[in-house]
Image (cartoon, coloured by chain):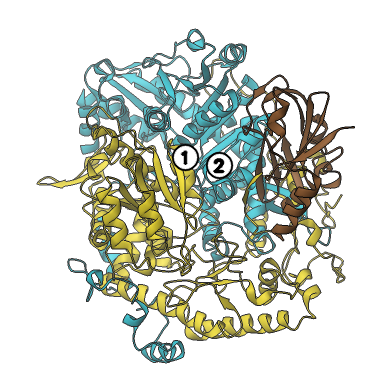
Amino acid sequence: MVQSTDLSQGRSGTIAMSAAAVETSTGNRGLQLEERLIFEYAHADRSGVDLPEPPKVKDRLGGLRRRGAIGLPGLAEPQVVQHYTRLSQKNYAIDSGLYPLGSCTMKHNPRLNERMARLPGFGDVHPLQPQSTVPGAIELIGELAGWLTTLTGMPAVAMSPAAGAHGEMCGMMAIAAALRARGEGHRKTVLVPESAHGTNPATAAALGFTVKPIAATADGRVDVAALKAALGPDVAAIMLTNPNTCGLFERDIREVGDAVSAAGAYFYCDGANYNAIVGRVRPGDLGVDCMHINLHKTFSTPHGGGGPGSGPVVLSARLAPYAPRPWVVHDANGWRLIEEGGAIDGEPLGRLKAFHGQMGMFVRALAYMLSHGADGLRQVAEDAVLNANYVMARLQVALTPAYDGPCMHECLFDDNFLKDTGVSTLDFAKAMIDEGYHPMTMYFPLVVHGAMLIEPTETQSKRSLDEFCDAMLHLARKAKSGTAADDFKAAPRFAPRRRLDETLAARKPVLRWRPTNRGPDDGPLKQAAE
Amino acid sequence: MATVKYTDEHEWVSVENGVGTVGITDYAQEQLGDVVFVEVPDVGRTVAKGEAVAVVESVKAASDIYAPASGEIVEANAALADAPGDVNLEPTGKGWFFKIKLADPSELDGLMDQAKYDAFVKSLA
Amino acid sequence: MRYLPLTDTDRREMLATIGARSIDDLFRDVPPSVRLPGPIAGLSSHMGELEVERRLGRMAARNIAASDVPFFVGAGAYKHHVPASVDHLIQRGEFLTSYTPYQPEITQGTLQYLFEFQTQITMLTGMEVANASMYDGSTGASEAVLMANRVTRRNKAVLSGGLHPHYRSVIETTAHWQGFRTVGAPVDADGIEDLSALVDKEVSCVVVQNPSVFGHVRDLTPLAEACHAAGALLVVVVTEVVSLGLLTPPGDMGADIVVCEGQSLGVGLNFGGPYVGLFATREKLLRQMPGRLVGETVDADGKRGFVLTLSTREQHIRREKATSNICTNSGLCALAFTIHLTLLGERGFTRLAEINHATAVRAAERLAKVPGVKVLNETFFNEFTVMLPKPAAPVIEALAARRILGGVPVSRLIPDAPLSADLLLVAVTETVTDADIEALATGLAEVL
């Protein structure tokens, strides 16, 4: 039995039942308001929009008019606004406070970015308008491309990937295309360090590569000796995250790049952690062949509850010819979009998505870059690294760092300090919720037992970090007292919901509301606990 | 009396009249946690030793189950579709996965017996 | 710098706590040869809000916005009116600046709206289960083919000649690099293709768009039957989701997987992205569906709550065995979509669809009266194809010079099909007025 595991959530068996039942008649607790589903408001006659009578015409639907109702609920605008406002109040967010989710880079999302993305000249233009009517939009893509290539020291960038994982797909396709063009399509092995994001092996496997894991050394870096031993004539590429998922800079990265290149393979860099080095190190100087950039991490575009992302991929000269359509070019006639063509040696590179990329994210990222400038972006990396090292320095008196510092933009602890306390990393995280914090990333990277990956980002003040560290030290001391395990198991107690039964959710999946679940439209909110 | 053997992937196989019944051990179900889904192989499928033939999933883990020997799948435990928790409750009883008609029973010779497996589990602690 | 709270005093104190002499000390693992001594040359220095607004505002002002002119551009992205409260609500920081709901106790807001979103998608499409969204319609279509390949254990997809050429290209790119075959049917501008002859025992799925990229509305029931008889799946793509307010849903015609571009509701044009892919299927195929899923459960107090579920299909657990490498969905666009649809409700949504269709019918009737213009469609929803007496691309440029954005020349989507050079796709939504239709008809008459 070989397991693929994510231990980041609990089992129902570990959920302690609450003694503190809700005592209000409404189920609300002050500002924490219970909220029914939109379907439980159900009045098909209501609407939150006023639309005119449609013009009378003879329809052209070929007899395919829908029969019967769709079943959508009707709500007036005030109900809609209240519904989503109440839902929003059940979410923790960067705007609420420190959100130390390691590897996800929850930095402040400037509202200027939002205003710029909504300028009609960007937000209200169609991708298939004549190019002559959108020169400023094409210029914006071109200017952002210029910032990305200059910052990374790479000659080209593919702008269309919709997110980081999509960018990985793009970069690995470019590598596959380059290998085929060289007549070396037989290279089918991709080396991936054990600590990598799950997307790396998933991407490589989807493209037909065989994934070969590379071990880590005791100091949290890729084992260069093991890597070199694995580099053979069958190796297509290495996928390496730098700074890596343990929050450490791969000291031997130049050596890795040289060895990979000498072996005839390509160097894919996962740029998820580029925010730690932006403006201080150019990946192009590290021997990288391609790297995706998560605009929502390094360049502050909003995370939006899990997307949309945007994952431009910078490419070395030897991979640049294999970028997907479309391209943005600048010539004597200004900026232009090349939508067709680009096939190399009969290898169609094709499209990765319809249209030209995540324009809304491009505007936000460029607004952020212009705001910071080259000087400010360098400061971003420095403050991010300083904040992470500060948290590590303050916490290491009670928590156990997985590796020696300095770290880069995030600091990693294992669960050694919880040994014999009866408190797990999961319990500790849930207790953080009661203290008013979003937990750090848990149980990732997989190479560290009970991992706690903390990324404060550069947009937190020293006071904010101090308060966070005080809370963490308090919890660590409490856990080590040996008498508080039940308290930890019962956490969270003050969140909109207590621990949720994931076993029930998975054994009997309920993935949509059905009319049989309907609650009363007025009166006390139905608690669907059956 | 059936003989029960164990693989180092924490599967058990109980052989009777040339047919092996396969499941996962108590140790394995403990490691997985609450089982929420089991995918069993189609009856009639011919499998090779070491081939992945079933999948067991808990909330946060998924594991492949391998054929302990070559042969033909002659029965699969359809009841697990509605009651995956049987794997937790009775891993060596009604939580069995599939039955395989062994092509070559000697393929099982290298597997562990109860005592060896118990020692193996102890060594993992 | 306004986004950076640390002061120089803070920095000194923090370095002292760490026991580092300088910031450079913290970067000591970086090989000295690649450390940059100062800001990267060739890029501007930091700017205030006003300067950034001026600079980007100038760029934006050079573009013609859809709301400012008679606008008939569609082909996979549609201009619709988005109620003010949608944009207000999605900008609430608790939605905008939250992440994937990994901690369900403090992200019930995101989880509940995704559960509602999934339910709405099943209702619109007539399917049983839907995921929490994909990047967009085109990538969703490609994922649908991969899913069909897994389900049927076959690897040949038939692509309709009425499928949006970008979607076709995305599927072909995926096919080329992920190792499956595609059979592309000829361009079907007239909406008469019969794909059932192409469905053999090797085919995993047929991908068909309804209404087609040329606007034709077809009954897909016979095609669904042909697919099922051959053991293949029918994948139906809908690029104009508003059409589902008026048309028989794909689920009622036998579709096995339905993929929609959801941009029409809540999202806006955004020059091509971000958009939101809707993905729905049959319950029995659930385990092979890509993407995130939200499910209902109870918490330790027995209260109803929501969690991400069935995540063992996903990359962070299955790694190289995952159903897809996708990590993010399109959360915020899904939120905009679901809020807009909630505002519309049954009555608003079906009426919106009626208005779109009726306005388009009037536009088609008016354009048919322009000398030399022929409307190809018998049937359509809010977009149809017209044949011009000369190539469409320069005509569109000439109209643009008159500040009329008259549609999408088919040659923009299919540059290598000379027979299509005179074809123009014209989209007509509720934002189009009688005056706009008259402007287009008059403009066309002038430039033809």
| Percent position of residue C83, x then y | 52, 50
Horizontal side of residue C328 vs C166, given as left or right? right
Q: Quadrant of residue B67?
A: top right
Q: Which residue is mark 2?
A: C322
Residue C375 sits in which quadrant?
A: top left
In the rendered image, which quarter contains the N terminus of chain C? bottom left
**Subunit of mark 2?**
C
Figure colour of chain C: cyan
Task: In this rendered view, identify the residue nearer to me: C380 or A525.
Answer: A525
Name the residue located 68 percent from the left edge and 72 percent from the top edge: A428
Please state which of residues A424 and A218 is positioned toward the viewer in this rendering: A218
Work out which residue is located at the far left of the displayed protein and give it. A332
Residue A175 relative to residue A438: left or right: left
Question: Which residue is painted at 28% across and 34% down in the image?
Answer: A184
- Cβ atoms under marks 2 and 1 closer than 8 Å: yes
Res. A118 in view: no
Shown in brown, the chain is B
Q: Which mark is residue A205?
A: 1
Q: Residues within 10 Å of mark 2 (few under 14, many from 20)?
A: many
